[in-house]
Amino acid sequence: MHGLPPHCKILATLGFVLAVVATPREQIWAFAAYALLLAGVAACARVPLGHVAKRVLIEVPFVGFAFLLPFLATGPRVEVLGLEMSQNGLWGAWNILAKGTLGVIASILLATTTDPRVLLLGVERLRVPPLLTQIATFMFRYGDVVVEEMRRMKTARAARGFEARDLRDARILARSLGALFLRCFERGERVHLAMLSRGYDGRMPVLLRADASGGQWAASAILPAAAAAVSLAAWMAQWTFL
């Protein structure tokens, strides 16, 4: 799992997510099958379930609306735990939670088994515009630099006795944010001039090849192929039920 080429894993993850999204929400068993597939991938990649569980919490702010759907949606009402809820809203909430969670877990497994720099190389192999990949590369490379700059500015404010207490201190924080933006802009200018002086012509040199063999493509296709089979079976069951 860790040694597969990055573009193979990206396409495998995308294929899996598309199969999950295309699955009828009423076929609950299919989502359980997807969860088992991801559990198998995690076991093969030796990714601890605790590692995945902690990081899946990132989706909580994005799926919060799903908890309101049973109360806001219209249509037939059913009673759940003493509360009247919309039947369509319940199915909609389930649809968002199930598919969103499976997609997030698949992304976590991809990120855990692939170094970020190698992941960007895989994105570039998939013919994503080079400018976008270069911007993402520099964001990743200089993210820690910006965070460290923010920490130094915070230390400087604290050394001068500043402590944010209420909205009246927002002006000082806004000035700090503006100063941080100017510093980042000037640093970007210096980095760009340094790159031009070293022969930069709009393309970054390729230091690592990520070619994939037929066996690696076949191994990467196992997950999306299995997910596609589950999705097809779910649709067949849906049509039979209808």
Image (cartoon, helix red, strand yellow):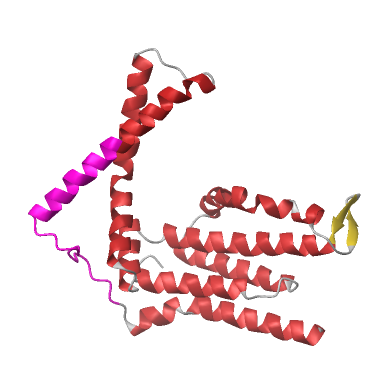
Q: Is residue 152 above or below residue 126?
A: above
| x, y percent for residue 227 | 58, 77
| 179 to the left or right of 108 | left
Q: In this picture, which residue range is highlighted in magenta?
A: 182-211
From the image, which quarter does the N terminus lie in?
bottom left
| x, y percent for residue 5 | 34, 71
| Residue found 83% across the figure and 60% down from its top | 74
Q: Looking at the image, which residue sits at the far top?
A: 161
Quarter of image, res 232: bottom right
Membership of 13 in magenta stretch: no
| Residue found 50% across the figure and 75% down from its top | 15
| 218 to the left or right of 86 | left
Quarter of image, res 28: bottom right
Quarter of image, res 22: bottom right
| 114 to the left or right of 165 | left
Residue 4 visible within the image: no
Membership of 189 in magenta stretch: yes
Q: Is residue 178 above or below residue 3?
A: above
| x, y percent for residue 91 | 76, 64
| Residue found 22% across the figure and 66% down from its top | 208
| x, y percent for residue 142 | 29, 45
